[in-house]
Amino acid sequence: MSDTMRRMDFANRTVVLGVGGGIAAYKACEVARLVVKGRGKVRVAMTRAATRFVGPLTFQAISGAPVVVDLLDEQTERSYGHLQLAREADLFLVAPATADLIARLRAGMGDDAVTTTALAVTCPILVAPAMNTRMWKNPAVQENLAALVARGWHVVGPGAGELADGDVGEGRLADPDEIATAASRLLGNLDLSGRRVVVTAGPTREPIDPVRFISNPSSGKMGYALAAVAARRGAEVVLVSGPTALPDPSGVRTLRVETAEEMARVVDDVAPGMDLFIGAAAVSDYRPASSAPHKVKKGPGDETLKLTRTPDILAGLGSRLAGKPDAPVLVGFAAETEEVITRAREKLKGKRCDLVVANKVGGSGSGFGSDTNRVALVSSTELAEIEGPKERVAEAIVDWILPVLDARRPRAKPLK
Ligand code: C5P
């Protein structure tokens, strides 16, 4: 089974697709097709407005079943009621979710086939918003969506790019492929199950004295996103984290450390048997040669701080494990302010890792502290660029790793 097919396995599952009235409705056809291709069943409910963009017959042809549009249609309600739709659903997917539809879903209205189905389902709900970028940024829309998320609903996208109305920005329906992948994952498609993953994240603090330290502005968001994504995809994850303001990700064993040396020690403890190591921490390369036991008093003149090297955790794992049969997959990060790709290639060789995730730091919209990231995945054979929220970047990094992991460390085949 190809990687893409495995990610989109819908066998024995029913996805109920609620189509909203936006120009992106035609892309929902592709989502429906991907579910069918992944051996799943699709049942479709449409808002009246949606039928102005795509005819119900199109969805009927793809899904092989009547489409529910009119709640008061005698024929449909006799043979295929909206409640029946809700009963069948293993996942309810709303795509595209327009600003109006999101508002009605938030309010709990039951004024059309989509909102009524939403009221009646007991399965997970995934919403794929799509609208003009100014509408998307409107606090009313954001508040409505936040209320749905607080109810436990899941959201995929929107993406950024050129919109149908000519505007450029966030608001574009996520790619059908991305929506189908998110849907299949919510249905419990756990492609990392049985895998042990260790992730480092955040900065380290190297004490000068009890109240001062050397550190960097790493927020830990990228490493936490990777740990959360790997756990959601079924891995057993240990996150070794320097000091951050982030809560422990759910389903992840989080071990907090302060210094590079502590981080190295804890990684050594948890490394045996791991399938994958992701070094997302911004480990301090130097520490003060000695740390004063008491607060250093200021003197009249300059001070000199003698620094000494800290252990390189990733390079250490590379030199001990890379090339061995059954070696874990090693992934490093390269945060650089210039010549990003060249430096990443050097790191790939120097630290003997399988993949280096390179990002340019110092600009806005990527790197330290930001919620979004633009990275290049650099391996010995490939160079790929990814941009988006850190969660999405994390998903793409895991997607890249998966076939390498499966080739390197094949899972034991279940006994027939
Ligand atoms: O050499 P540089 O610090 O730029 O390398 C970055 C990569 O190496 C990151 O993946 C980081 O987590 C890892 N690293 C490490 N231990 C260090 C320094 C960096 O694991 N002491």
Image: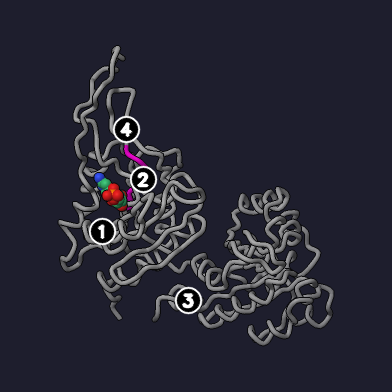
The local secondary structure at tag 3 comes to loop
| Residue pointed to by mark 3 | 9
How far apart are the alpha carbons under marks 1 and 2? 30 Å
Query: Mark 2 — residue?
Result: 254
Q: Nearer the viewer, mark 4 or mark 1?
A: 1
Dot 2: element: strand
- Within-10-Å neighbours for mark 1: few <14, some 14–19, many 20+: few
Residue shown at 81%/83% (left/top)? 75
Does 99 lie within the magenta span? Answer: no
Q: Can you give x and y, in whole percent of width and height, for residue 251 in the image? A: 42, 52
Helix, strand or loop for disc 4: strand
Q: Nearer the viewer, residue 158 or 379?
A: 379
Does residue 180 lie above or below 224 as drawn? below
What range of the chain is rendered magenta? 199-204
Work out whether mark 3 precedes mark 4 in sequence or the reverse, and give the earlier one. Answer: 3
Kindly identify the amino acid type of the residue bearing the numbered disc 3.
Asp
Whole-Å distance between the Cαs marked 2 and 3? 31 Å
